[in-house]
Image (cartoon, rainbow, N blue to C red):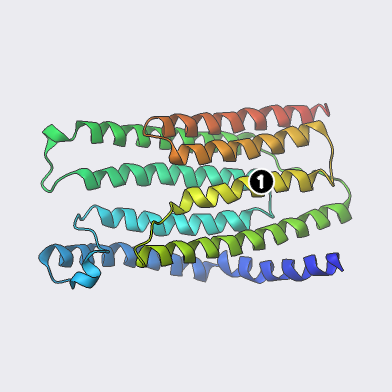
Amino acid sequence: MLRKLQNSIAKIYDPIEKYWDGDNNQRIIGTILVFSFLISLLLIHLNILGFIPDLLSQYIATNHYAAINVAFVVLLTVEVISLIFSLPKSLARSVQKQFEIISLILLRNAFKEFSNFSEPIDWSASYDTIFHIMSDSISAILVFLGIYLIRRIRVHHSITTNDNNQENFKVTKKVISVMLMIAFLFLAIQDSYMFFTHSNTFKFFPAFYNILIYTDILMVLVSLRYSYRYRVLFRNSGFALATVLLRLSLSAPVYFNAAIAVFSVAFVYMITLIYQQMRKRDL
């Protein structure tokens, strides 16, 4: 009965994932990103000129640089959905996707700092902002480098040689992915409702990373059903810890957020390197 329920839920995943990764959807996403940026610029400019009604003007920024943040929020939302679809493919791949998201968040933070600039820019009052931009930019580059180094050494291996167990593990990961998708939609709807009703909104991406922490721990526990090897247990647990560190970086103050993100990617690189060597020597 439980196996039938799992298979039924897993079947929901396949057509959605196929559509999401399709070329047509990628073109649609690209179009949405372009229009979200251009429409944001237009609305901000109209708001500055006073053409937006008071009922709506409170929701629209008055600094043109805020349009960059809007485009990045849309891009990050797309990347989070891609992360959800990466879970059934490989735990290591999903962790890499998390680093991709963090690197984009760091870049978004750097762009958000531009909203602190006046128009025209007053350089005498902008030194702190410039240092913040440099910190987020450099850390984003280092995380980007870390992703490249991890990809160079990572070789995907199944955690079990039993085909039936491997298929069952994959179905279970699809079920978890569908559950994560539902949680993502719930958070998005809740955050939007709170925003438009003037309630105290929460930070969406840190909240989603909280759920990712529990998801990764669940994946570690599920993987033990199919492999109890120490190296697999340590690697997967280390990946879960990396998610915790990334969550901390999202709420850490400037400079500390950059340091935690860079440490996290270095931590996962070392785990991947040691794991590959242990597997090669069958230790």
Residue 123: x and y in percent read 13, 35
On screen, residue 252 versus residue 228, left or right, reads left
Residue closest to the eye, 30 or 85:
85
Q: Amino acid at mark 1?
A: Asp
Q: Quadrant of residue 8?
A: bottom right
Residue positioned 30% across, 36% down in the render: 133
Name the residue rendered at 30%, 34% in the picture: 132
Q: How many marks?
A: 1
Res. 212 in view: yes
Looking at the rendering, which quadrant does residue 173 occupy? bottom right
Residue 4 appears left or right of 243 = right
Vertical position of residue 25 compared to residue 263: above or below? below
Image point 48% across, 59% down: which residue? 78
Residue that badge 1 annotates: 216
Mark 1 element type: helix
For residue 199, above or below residue 256 = below
Residue 16 placed where, x, y %? 62, 69
Residue 72, x across and y down, in percent: 37, 54
Q: Nearer the viewer, residue 163 or 255?
A: 255
* x, y percent for residue 74: 41, 59
* Residues packed near mark 1 inside 10 Å, few (<14), some (14 to 19) or many (20 plus): many
Q: Is residue 246 left or right of residue 153?
A: left
Quarter of the N terminus within the rendering? bottom right
Q: Quadrant of residue 252?
A: top left
Farthest residue toward the front?
Answer: 199
In the rendered view, tell whether residue 74 sits above or below residue 137: below
At a point 12% along the width and 48% down the height, the residue shown is 119
